[in-house]
């Protein structure tokens, strides 16, 4: 009897120690994740002269001055860049999710010859990175006069194997074929069924994938940097990379931090509002089945 | 089932390939430049930084109804040239409003564009070279047949800009004539560097500070007629000197444009000499002009150990421009318009590509540079130096070779790698950028 | 009887609807062929040619067979084969970030799913650790550069403390640059991995844990004997996706080192190497590099496909079985 009690307390003490360690690790990681953002926000609120002195724990009063300077900078037109990135990211998010859902539906709802081959094929190409066909892609786009155009940054999103896979998985779990049959009985044609019945049913999947497509398009650097030349067409990542150029030493550092902050801000805002469904989306996408 | 899918895929592939290979066959016909056509409404300028843009916006009045587009790509690792080449190669296909009208080029690669059909004879658009323009600026902008393709808005004799207070401490004098006498050869310059070091100063603030003083006195081009890479004795001398300077602590491991170097121009800086032409004031010495931490008036300029010139920005007329009148207008404004050239000297500290204006300032006893110097007449110094500038031994590869050598050797000078590895990296860079250049047998 | 009727009816219908399947998947394949497949074939095609530019002058294309591949594997004066060096760099950079990423993610996933520990504030922690995943890599990298640059605050702080002198340069030291890249990759990805692994653990039948505990297994034994084997498919999936992400590593080192891969090319990745040739329009060499990368990722992709297609096959069989029953 006695022994059991001491065992119990021992276990409890162990558990408490374990908990302390676990929370310590969590707090440390949280600190690590937030530290750089905090630093960036603090530094974006300091003047160039203040920044030269090193670190500061608290924000200073130069935030709006830096914001004004960064916003109105003549060589790095960040508002224009943000608008450009927004246009590209929203369009490609719409196109990617719609067509991926369409493709997934085509395979999910219909039986046709070669269906298995098609599915196998998409799965096989899923892991091939876009960089390895970048050369031919650039060559073609140049030939078709699509440099300095957003078409090559948006339209290829129609074929997005990863999004397709997610949609397909999702449809398998929420979209019984009976529903489609029912719609057919009601005389709905196939496209209308897809647009008015299927799409609303997979809304959560569409929302999640829209966010992911938006984010990856917003952050995309490799291909846009090779395709876009004109200042008024440049996207945010190109502008950020441009900061790291020969004239770096001449920049007002407060402004540089502000540029970086502006570059990640839209995504951060979206994330803070939608973090719950985003995290759910990560899980659902990768471990189903 | 599988078979049908495969056939379908193959068919689709075929369609794709046909669609793409059919395209390159129809080459668009090149349209000849026609000067009589109506002038365009959009004027596109390619540049690698904001320097000329500033002058352009201040001193040139854009004709009503014309929009000016600046397409600016930093020149790092040749990025500017790559973007410009891409646009020029596409010039014939571009719509009128997308065509390049004017582009800027540096001494290091101007030849590449001048000797091509992508630039046009500026006499055809009604611009005639004036004898007030420096000969070398015309030669640089002319192709092998002597056809001139553009103008420079500046002339770039370069000199040594020194801190008076530090010179006084090191040499016991800050008088330009005496300072010049103390550093009029590299041997003497090295000796002063040792003295400066003893007093706790740096002679220069960047390992590459003296590079142009050597490289623009080369007696042979970087690449010979058979595409062989060759090292001029001047380049070798620079490497030897820098090696010594780094080892002895006479200079810093920062690059010419690095903040660590330009921070040395603040009043608290410990560096005695900087190497540069007139554009250097505005472009690189803003720290010295900082109202709080700067040291305006503590500077003087002398010829230094070896006369040289550095850089210069040329404005080239792009073939296919539909704004030929405006082009001509811009060229005239920045070379022949004495009023503008005067303002470039007075307000911007530039040295103009106009001998008449330059002489006027050089001979004016009341003229002195107070923007940064102590009121010394720097125009007079530059005017002397400008007479001797010759345009020779340039190749189209100079930018990558000059800057690449500096970049790759920087890692040797800062101690991260040995000399052989650094040179090997330099050769690799050449191999990646210009596969045609034959490297010294390894 | 009725069942059979609907069944046959369905079968007839599914034949007549087959064309809709093709119509629905057509846009995907058209886009894929135009924007990926044809470029892919063009890339392979180019790799057999000498084709580059000297400024405005085009050299080639001249057919050179495998010369570009041979050139890629030619050692330089120091005996280094650059493509192998860059492949090794890529691998080192990836491993340096991935090891802590997976270790920490696994630990966190176990912490979060442990009913005994009963961690509070899970959704807060998850939100925070996932956040870096969404950051623009170029911006994150730029932030690191500004912080660690020779005129940045960290240099100033360490100089003030007398730890280093002004000639110190974080970007001249291999370990520090690689460390920065690894740290950034770790921060950007460990949250994502944690969440995925967590979901995997929660998907495991709880009764298995219970019975293992009743059998007297301690938590370490439970982890290695129960959790890990059952988690294996998801773990391997994570690992391989991460690996393929690693092969594509570009934005972070590119921006951090201005494309040079300082110091001495030790942080230059395969894609940075490719990017260098793409920018100079050396289509032959960049084609050859692309093909080599394609082969590597293709190999990894095949493994992933094998793993992922297995459950699909099962489902397909079930599907058919169900149909069979109906008929």
Image (cartoon, coloured by chain):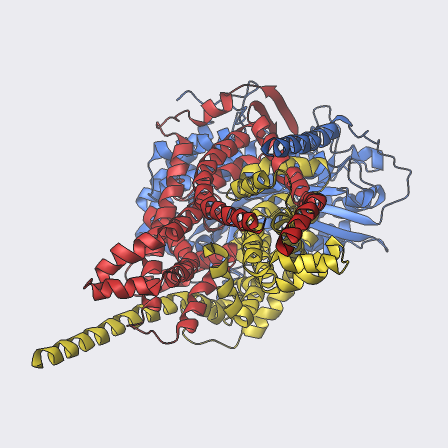
Residue C298 at x, y = what percent? 48, 37
Q: In this orientation, does residue B198 appear?
A: yes
Viewer-closest of B8 and A19: B8
- Relative placement, left or right, of A9 versus A175 is left
Check the image and report above or below for B109 versus A185: above
> Hue of chain C?
red
Seen at 70% across and 57% down, the residue is A194
Residue B421 at x, y = what percent? 36, 33
Seen at 62% across and 34% down, the residue is B5
Viewer-closest of A195 and B250: A195
Residue B45 at x, y = what percent? 72, 46
| Chain colored yellow | A
Check the image and report above or below for B305 versus B199: above
- Relative placement, left or right, of A280 versus C54 is left
How many tags in the picture? 0
Viewer-closest of C9 and C144: C9
Q: In this orientation, does residue B58 appear?
A: no
Check the image and report above or below for B79 versus B32: below
- Relative placement, left or right, of A9 versus C185 is left
Which quadrant is the N terminus of chain A positioned in?
A: bottom left
Residue C208 at x, y = what percent? 30, 61
- Relative placement, left or right, of B168 versus B45 is left
> Hue of chain B?
blue
Residue at the left extreme of this rendering? A2
């Amino acid at each position: 009897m006695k022994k059991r009690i001491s065992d119990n307390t021992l276990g409890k003490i162990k558990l408490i120690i374990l908990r302390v360690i676990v929370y310590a690790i969590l707090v440390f990681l949280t600190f690590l994740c937030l530290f750089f953002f905090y630093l960036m926000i603090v530094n974006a609120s300091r003047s160039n002269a203040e920044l030269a002195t090193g670190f500061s724990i608290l924000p200073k009063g130069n935030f709006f001055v830096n914001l004004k300077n960064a916003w109105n900078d003549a060589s790095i037109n960040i508002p224009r860049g943000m608008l450009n990135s927004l246009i590209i990211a929203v369009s490609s998010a719409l196109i990617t999710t719609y067509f991926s859902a369409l493709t997934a539906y085509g395979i999910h709802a219909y039986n046709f010859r070669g269906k298995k081959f098609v599915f196998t094929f998409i799965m096989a190409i899923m892991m091939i990175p876009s960089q390895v066909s970048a050369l031919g892609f650039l060559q073609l786009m140049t030939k078709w006069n699509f440099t300095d155009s957003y078409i090559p940054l948006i339209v290829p999103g129609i074929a997005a194997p990863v999004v397709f896979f997610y949609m397909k998985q999702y449809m398998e779990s929420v979209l019984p074929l009976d529903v489609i049959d029912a719609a057919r009985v009601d005389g709905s044609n196939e496209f209308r069924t897809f647009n008015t019945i299927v799409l609303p049913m997979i809304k959560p999947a569409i929302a999640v994938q829209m966010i992911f497509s938006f984010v990856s398009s917003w952050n995309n650097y490799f291909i846009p940097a090779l395709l876009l030349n004109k200042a008024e067409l440049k996207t945010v990542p190109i502008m950020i990379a441009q900061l790291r150029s020969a004239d770096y030493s001449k920049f007002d550092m407060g402004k540089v931090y502000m540029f970086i902050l502006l570059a990640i801000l839209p995504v951060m805002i979206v994330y803070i509002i939608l973090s719950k469904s985003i995290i759910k989306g990560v899980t659902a996408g990768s471990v189903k089945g | 089932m599988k078979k049908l899918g495969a056939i379908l895929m193959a068919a689709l592939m075929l369609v794709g390939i046909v669609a793409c290979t059919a395209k390159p066959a129809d080459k668009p016909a090149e349209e000849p430049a026609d000067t009589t056509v109506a002038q365009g409404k959009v004027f596109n300028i390619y540049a690698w930084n904001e320097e000329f843009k500033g002058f352009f916006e201040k001193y040139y009045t854009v004709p009503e109804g014309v929009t000016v587009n600046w397409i600016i790509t930093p020149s790092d690792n040749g990025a500017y040239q790559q973007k410009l080449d891409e646009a020029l190669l596409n010039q014939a296909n571009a719509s009128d409003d997308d065509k390049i009208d004017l582009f800027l080029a540096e001494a290091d690669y101007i030849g590449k564009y001048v000797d091509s059909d992508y630039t046009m004879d500026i006499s055809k658009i009604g611009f005639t070279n004036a004898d007030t323009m420096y000969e070398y600026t015309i030669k640089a902008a002319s192709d092998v047949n002597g056809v001139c393709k553009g103008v420079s808005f500046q002339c770039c004799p370069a000199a040594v800009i020194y801190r008076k207070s530090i010179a006084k401490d090191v040499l016991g004098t800050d008088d330009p004539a005496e300072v010049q006498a103390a550093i009029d050869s590299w041997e003497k310059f090295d000796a002063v560097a040792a003295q400066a070091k003893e007093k706790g100063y740096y002679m220069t603030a960047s390992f590459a500070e003296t590079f142009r003083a050597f490289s623009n006195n080369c007696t042979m081009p970087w690449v010979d007629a058979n595409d062989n890479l060759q090292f001029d004795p001047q380049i070798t001398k620079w490497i030897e000197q820098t090696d010594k300077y780094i080892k002895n602590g006479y200079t810093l491991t920062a690059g010419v444009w690095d903040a660590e170097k330009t921070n040395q121009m603040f009043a608290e800086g410990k560096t005695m000499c900087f190497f540069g032409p007139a554009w250097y004031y505005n472009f690189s010495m803003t720290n010295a002009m900082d109202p709080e931490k700067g040291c305006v008036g503590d500077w003087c300029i002398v010829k230094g150990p070896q006369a040289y010139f550095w850089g210069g920005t040329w404005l080239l007329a792009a073939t296919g421009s539909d704004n030929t009148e405006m082009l001509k207008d811009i060229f005239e404004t920045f070379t022949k318009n004495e009023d503008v050239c005067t303002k470039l000297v007075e307000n911007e500290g530039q040295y103009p590509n106009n001998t008449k204006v330059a002489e006027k300032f050089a001979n004016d006893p009341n003229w002195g540079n107070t923007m940064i110097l102590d009121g010394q007449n720097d125009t007079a110094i530059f005017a002397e130096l400008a007479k001797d500038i010759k345009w020779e031994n340039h190749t189209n590869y100079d930018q990558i070779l000059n800057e690449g050598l500096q970049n790759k050797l920087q890692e040797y000078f800062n101690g991260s790698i040995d000399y052989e590895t650094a040179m090997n990296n330099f050769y690799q860079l050449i191999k990646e950028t210009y596969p045609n250049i034959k490297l010294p047998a390894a | 009887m009725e069942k059979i009727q609907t069944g046959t009816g369905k079968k007839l219908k599914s034949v007549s609807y087959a064309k809709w399947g093709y119509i629905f998947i057509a846009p995907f394949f058209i886009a894929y062929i135009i924007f990926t497949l044809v470029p892919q074939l063009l890339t392979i095609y180019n790799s057999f040619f000498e084709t580059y530019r000297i400024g405005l002058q085009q050299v080639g294309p001249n057919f050179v067979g495998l010369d570009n591949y041979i050139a890629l594997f030619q050692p330089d004066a120091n005996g280094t084969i650059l493509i192998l060096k860059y492949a090794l760099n890529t691998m080192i950079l990836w491993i340096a970030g991935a090891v802590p990423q997976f270790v920490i993610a696994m630990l966190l996933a176990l912490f979060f799913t442990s009913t005994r520990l009963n961690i509070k504030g899970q959704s807060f922690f998850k939100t925070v650790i996932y956040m870096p995943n969404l950051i623009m890599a170029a911006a994150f990298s730029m932030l690191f550069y500004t912080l660690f640059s020779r005129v940045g605050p960290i240099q100033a702080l360490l100089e003030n403390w007398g730890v280093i002198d002004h000639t110190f340069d974080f970007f001249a030291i291999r370990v520090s640059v690689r460390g920065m890249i690894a740290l950034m990759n770790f921060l950007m990805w460990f949250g994502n991995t944690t969440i995925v692994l967590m979901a995997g653990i929660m998907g495991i039948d709880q009764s298995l844990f219970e019975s293992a505990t009743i059998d007297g297994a301690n938590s370490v034994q439970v982890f290695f004997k129960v959790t890990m084997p059952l988690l294996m498919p998801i773990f391997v999936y994570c690992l391989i996706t991460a690996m393929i992400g690693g092969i594509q590593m570009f934005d972070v080192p590119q921006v951090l080192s201005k494309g040079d891969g300082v110091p001495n090319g030790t942080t230059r990745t395969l894609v940075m190497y490719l990017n260098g040739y793409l920018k100079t329009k050396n289509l032959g060499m960049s084609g050859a590099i692309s093909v080599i990368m394609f082969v590597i990722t293709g190999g990894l992709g095949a493994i992933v496909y094998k793993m992922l297609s297995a459950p699909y096959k099962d489902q397909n069989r079930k599907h058919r079985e169900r149909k069979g029953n109906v008929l």
